[in-house]
Amino acid sequence: MKSLAAQNSPFADAGFQLEVLRQPLPQGTVFPAFGQRLLDHGLWPLKPSHISILQVNLGKMCNQVCKHCHVDAGPDRKEIMTRETMQLCLEVLAKTDIPVVDLTGGAPEMNPHFRWFVEEISKLGRQLLVRCNLTIILANPKYHDLPEFFRQHRVQVVSSLPYFTASRTDTQRGDGVFDKSIKALKMLNAVGYGHEDSGLTLDLVYNPAGAFLPGNQKALEGEFKRRLQQGYGITFNNLFAITNLPISRYLDYLISTGNYEPYMEKLVNAFNPAAAANVMCRHTLSVGWEGSLYDCDFNQMLDLPVEARAPRHLRDFNLEALSLRDIVVNQHCFGCTAGAGSSCGGETVA
């Protein structure tokens, strides 16, 4: 039987989340529970505002091994979404009005059914984003026509470029990545991407190379546009500034360099309730490569599925039930609520 204190606790009806919050932290460090911080600002339990984006992870296979990767993706990863699971995604889209599909990985283009999936989503008339690491375009001749394929299907291309210099980019993503990224960006520009009034959107993603928060997104965008235009003649539409979350390889980096505690303190101290009110998990549903459902891509990598009262797999998909779920949170969520906030679309507050 629960104690009186437990019965009166704001977490009494959310035991599944309370257990998540009690998970041990690296090095035994204790920080304020993220759920408690939400409660302090009247945001507990965190609920979806709507579901407008279905973010689909097509697998963990990638041609790069980036130091900050929260997916721990690489050429040796075998997890890959099957065509049968993709068909379940299509069935979900066909019976709902979710307007945006966001394809990610790994390198989503390495999935053998990637092009078929894009074509089928296009037939449904949904806005389609592909998170392209750029170097995949040059990795193999079979990918060289990706810019034209993206153009044909009006895909919004979202690409990571840590910085506008080779040294900073290659330190984070590997030797030679910057030069290959520049070549790929020029190929995308050549078919119309990033040009005003072309209707072909090319967005870049910036995330810090060290244990610090990103700078002002608007200022960074201006600097990136100026430097890439002047140095390489490259144009793009928007820059998304994303905070690195303490997960997988980036967590390993923080611990190995003795930066875990200072970095977590930065995130906790920079908690912004306005950012918390607009985090991506409130409007995005994440689909794992095997069809399981998660509140966000980060929870997916931590194997934290949507709460037990909601459907947890595509085959049981129920939009109404998922719209009423409580969002599962943990300490890493401080990364999305620090400062101006962070999401797959960059800052969450001005």
Image (tube, helix red, strand yellow):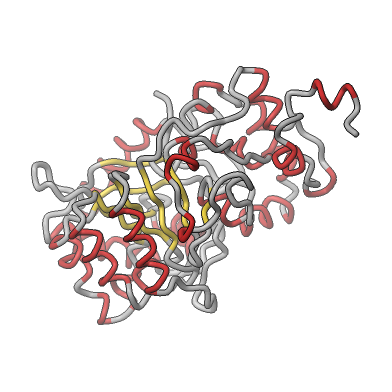
* Count of numbered labels shown in the rendering: 0
Q: Where residue 19 appears, x then y in whole percent?
A: 77, 42
Residue 51, compared with residue 118, is above or below; it is above
**Relative to the observer, which residue lies in front, 92 or 138?**
92
Residue 258: give x, y in percent of width and height.
75, 48
Q: Residue at x 40, y 34 (%)?
A: 50
Quarter containing the N terminus? top right
Instruction: Reply above or below: 39 against 317.
Output: above
Residue most extreme to the top: 41
Q: Residue at x 24, y 49 (%)?
A: 127
Looking at the rendered image, the quarter that the C terminus falls into is top left
Looking at the picture, does residue 166 appear above or below residue 337? below
Q: Where is residue 15 in the image (x, y as percent from the top left)?
A: 75, 38
Left or right of 31? Residue 66 is left
Q: On the rendered structure, is 223 left or right of 36? A: left
- Residue 270's quadrant in the figure? top right
In the image, 45 versus 254, the foreground residue is 45
Residue 14 place in picture, x, y as percent:
70, 34
Q: Is residue 290 left or right of residue 1?
A: left
Q: Which residue is drawn at 53% across and 31% down?
A: 47
* Most distant residue in the bottom direction: 141
Q: Which residue is drawn at 31% across and 51% down?
A: 95
